[in-house]
Image: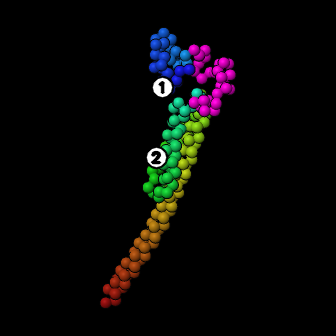
Amino acid sequence: MSSRVGFRFFNNARFAFRNASAPFRRPGAQGWRFQSSEAGAGAAEQQSTFQRLWNSPVGVKTVHFWAPVMKWALVIAGISDFNRPAEKLSLTQNAALMGTGAIWTRWCLIIKPRNVLLAAVNFFLGCVGVVQVSRIYMWRQSQEGSAIEAVKDMEKDVADSAKAVANKAEGAVKAEKSS
């Protein structure tokens, strides 16, 4: 059996001009790319777990396996940002992680072959985004609350100062009138 590593287009390039669907078919395959034949089903039962993982449509030789493995770096980076102060986090970046995590989790369960590994990493990426966006939101709310309190304190100080100035002015006017 020939190795299926690499682009199948280049492996079957000699058939590309005669039959448009040939680059996407395995040599000798009767059906489409991910359909299993009855002979293939019998051979799959005889394969070891490693061979099934290796020859799977979402196996180690495909992007369906390596994309989730590489995407875990984003999840790990997001988790390491849990230690950073919320004021140093980017709302747009974490909102984008949250949104892409949610959208791609759903998409990974719809596409064929269904890629559960990619759905899992996207789910956790969305969870990290939700946590970070929540932290940023709560920090901003606390800052707005303290800003409102600071403004109220400033208003009180200004009002007290204005009253003191008004009292001094009244005292000066009274002193002027009495003299």
Residue 93 bears which disc, if any?
Answer: 2
Residue drawn at x 56%, y 37% is 118
* Above or below: residue 47 compared with residue 170: above
Looking at this view, is 113 or 134 the one in front?
113
| Number of numbered discs visible in the structure rendering | 2
Q: Is residue 161 above or below residue 37?
A: below
Q: Nearer the viewer, residue 139 or 74?
A: 74
Q: Residue at (64%, 27%) from the top-left corner?
A: 47
The percent position of residue 77, horizontal first and vertical second, equals: 48, 48
- x, y percent for residue 103: 55, 38
Determine if residue 111 is in view.
Answer: no
Residue type at mark 1: give it.
Answer: Gly
> Secondary structure beneath disc 1?
loop
Mark 2 touches mark 1? (CB < 8 Å) = no
Nearer to me, 20 or 40? 40
**Image height of 65 relative to 139, above or below:** above
Name the side, left or right, on which 18 lies relative to 177: right
The residue depicted at 50 percent of the width and 41 percent of the height is: 71
- Few, some or many C-alpha atoms within 10 Å of disc 1 (few <14, some 14-19, many ≥20)? few
Inspect the image, locate mark 2, and give the three-letter code of the amino acid beneath it. Gln
Q: In the rendering, which numbered label is found on residue 6?
A: 1
* Range of residues picked out in magenta: 28-54
Between the C-alphas of marks 2 and 1, the distance is 34 Å
Residue 67 seen: yes
Side (left or right) of 39 relative to 33: right
Helix, strand or loop for disc 2: helix
The reply, left or right, for residue 171 in relation to residue 18 is left
Residue 53 sits inside the magenta stretch: yes
Going from N to C along the chain, the mark reached first, 2 or 1, is 1
Q: Residues within 10 Å of mark 2 (few under 14, many from 20)?
A: few
Residue found 49% across the figure and 21% down from its top: 8
